[in-house]
Image (cartoon, grey):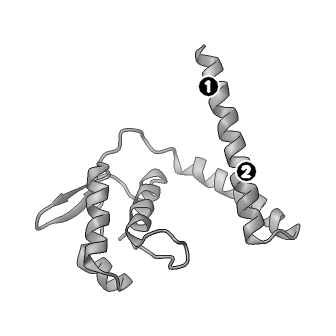
Amino acid sequence: MFVFRLDTHSGVPPYLQLVQQVRQAVLLGFLQPGDRLPLIREVVEELAINPNTVAKAYRQMEQENLVTGRPGRGTFVNEQQSAAMPASTYTSLRRGLETWLRRAYAAGLDEQAVDALFASAHQQTRNDHRQTRNEDVA
């Protein structure tokens, strides 16, 4: 069964953390269409948070068509429009990223510097990718 977690130091509202975790789990293939999310009361007990927070997250996920609530049965993951990549692709990419992170920390970067460097590289690469795609279409 899927287990939620909360990072009280992230600055991200708890309901959004729950939504992001489901989005990521679906994208990475950890949650499949038809999988049931924990009941609201189960999440409340596990995380010791307000039931309204969990209900808000579940409503948000329903609005995004990530899940469908079935009264008396639970909340289930929907079939997604775009298929998730094979797990092997994510595994390979993750290994490369973990190697990069180890090198960054070994070079003496702290967490803030790693985050800044990653964000900068991510932004530049995304911009380059968009530009290349636009040139291919033109």
Residue that appears at 32% across and 77% down: 43
Q: Position of residue 126 (x, y in %)?
A: 65, 40
Locate the N terminus by quadrant.
Answer: bottom left
Quarter of the view holding residue 109: bottom right
Residue 38, placed above or below residue 93: below
Q: Residue at x 77, y 65 (%)?
A: 113
Which of the 4 image quadrants contains residue 136? top right
Looking at marks 1 and 2 on the same chain, the residue that comes earlier in the sequence is marked by: 2
**Farthest residue in the left direction?**
72
In the rendered image, the vertical position of residue 99 relative to residue 121, given as above or below: below
Q: Nearer the viewer, residue 56 or 40?
A: 56
Please state which of the two labelled residues, at mark 1 or mark 2, is closer to the viewer.
2
Relative to the observer, which residue lies in front, 33 or 61? 61
In the picture of the structure, the residue carrying the numbered disc 2 is 120
Marks 1/2: CA–CA distance:
20 Å
Give the camera-side residue of 68 and 114: 114
Whole-percent x and y of residue 104?
Answer: 82, 63
- Is residue 86 positioned above or below 54 on the image? above
Farthest residue to the top: give it.
Answer: 138
Residue 133's tag is 1
Amino acid type at image mark 2: Ser
User: As drawn, is 46 to the left or to the right of 100?
Assistant: left
Asked if the residue under mark 2 is in contact with the one under mark 1, i.e. CB atoms within 8 Å, the reply is no
